[in-house]
Image: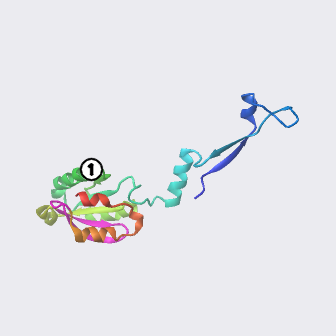
Amino acid sequence: MRVGKLQVDFNLPQRFDITYVDSNAEKRRPIMIHRAVLGSLERFFGVLIEHYAGDFPLWLSPVQARILPVTDAQLGYCKVVADKLKTYGIRVEVLHGERLPKLIRNAEKQKIPLMAVVGSKEVETETVTVRSRFGGELGTIELRNQHDHVQLKKIKALPSRLGNLSFIQHI
């Protein structure tokens, strides 16, 4: 990924009437060289999007997790889970209204890194079943405990493309 550039500028020294005295004691017009490490911000983001092909790591993904209820009966619990995750700085959304396989397929197509599936069993046990776009089903995480060590180890073993998952320790 290359975004840095050097530019030779003949115009600005003339506009600002910049001169220097050379070894012959004559006034000369310098040539300015501009250096931009990242280029323009827009160019940087364009290169970043192109580099990842929209498949951002977890820490950079606009939506880090999507909560998917099996039926609309679990929607209230899904909103509670989403609010809890938002308090930890997770960019999360709840999506419903379609069949679960279609919701999962759409989340994978939209390159959402993590999905939390919620059915009646998860509501009763105050858990969520976590799926990764990279690693499939990761298991169940209890939301009433500080953290579930077994599931944390599974999630942390995902490919590094997921980025930092330290937020899960706070759930």
Estimate how packed mark 1 is, as few (under 14), some (14 to 19) or many (20 or more) residues with alpha carbons within 10 Å: few
Taking 124 as reference, is 18 above or below it? Answer: above
Residue 57 location (% of width, % of height): 42, 60
Q: Residue at x 65, y 49 (%)?
A: 5
Residue 9 location (% of width, % of height): 72, 39
Q: State which quadrant residue 105 falls in.
A: bottom left
Drawn side of residue 62 relative to residue 138, left or right: right
Q: Amino acid at mark 1?
A: Lys
Drawn side of residue 17 relative to residue 145, left or right: right
Q: Residue at x 54, y 50 (%)?
A: 44
Residue 61 location (% of width, % of height): 40, 55
Q: Which residue bears the numbered disc 1?
A: 86
Q: State which quadrant residue 137 falls in.
A: bottom left
Report the predominant secondary structure element of the magenta stretch.
strand
Q: Quadrant of the C terminus?
A: bottom left
Residue 132 location (% of width, % of height): 33, 67
According to the image, what is the colour scheme of the structure?
rainbow
Drawn side of residue 158 relative to residue 71, left or right: right
- In the structure shown, which secondary structural element does the residue marked by tag 1 occupy? helix
**Depth order, front residue of 67/48:** 48
Drawn side of residue 133 relative to residue 19, left or right: left
Q: Quadrant of the N terminus?
A: bottom right
Q: Extreme left residue here? A: 124
**Depth order, front residue of 95/59:** 59
Taking 22 as reference, is 166 above or below it? Answer: below
Residue 138 is covered by the magenta coloring: yes
Residue 156 is covered by the magenta coloring: no
Q: Residue at x 77, y 37 (%)?
A: 30
The residue segment tinted magenta is 127-146
How many numbered badges does the structure rendering display?
1
